[in-house]
Amino acid sequence: MANAPMIVLTSEALDPAEARRLVHAFFSDMVKVVVDVRRERAAVGGELHADAEQLLLEEGSEQADLWGANYYPGRGLEACVEFTAMINIRPALGNAGMEIQDPDVRRLVWDVVSRVLGRGEPL
């Protein structure tokens, strides 16, 4: 897997082995995710949310639709998604900090992350 991509674009569930590879590529306990909430698509992996964000923008996503999160396998349903990323700082959209404030956006991010990566189960 020497040439395997460090960021995977998907709308579907990742194979557990692929998810495990992405989790361990940069951070042994988590993986960064950027979700296009309108297209229900995710960029999973990479060292920075900005790198995953850039791939989605190149694929046709709109900036306002992209939100970052971190996924922690093995932490269970309530603690597996952290809605925090530098790319979430969007004062013009009412999000002044790194954490996603809008409960509807959080739900949309949760829905995509849980579909592509899981609900906090161990990998």
Image: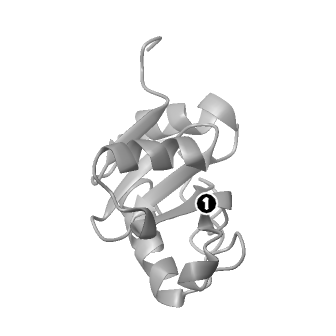
Q: Where is residue 6 in the image (x, y as percent from the top left)?
A: 49, 29
Q: Position of residue 123 (x, y in %)?
A: 53, 45
Q: Which of 26 and 24 is in front in this view?
A: 26
Q: Which of 53 and 15 is in front in this view?
A: 53
In the rendered image of this protein, does residue 95 appear above or below residue 82? below
In the rendered image of this protein, does residue 48 appear above or below residue 118? above
* Residue 114 visible in rendering: no
- 12 vs 16, left or right, is left
Q: Position of residue 30 (x, y in %)?
A: 65, 47
Tell me which residue sits at (63%, 43%) in the image. Answer: 48
Residue type pointed to by label 1:
Ile
- 116 vs 81, left or right, is left
- 117 vs 25, left or right, is left
Q: For mark 1, what is the residue?
A: 87
Q: Which of 59 and 71 is in front in this view?
A: 59
Badge 1, how many Cα within 10 Å: few under 14, some, many 20+? Answer: many
The image's colouring method is one colour
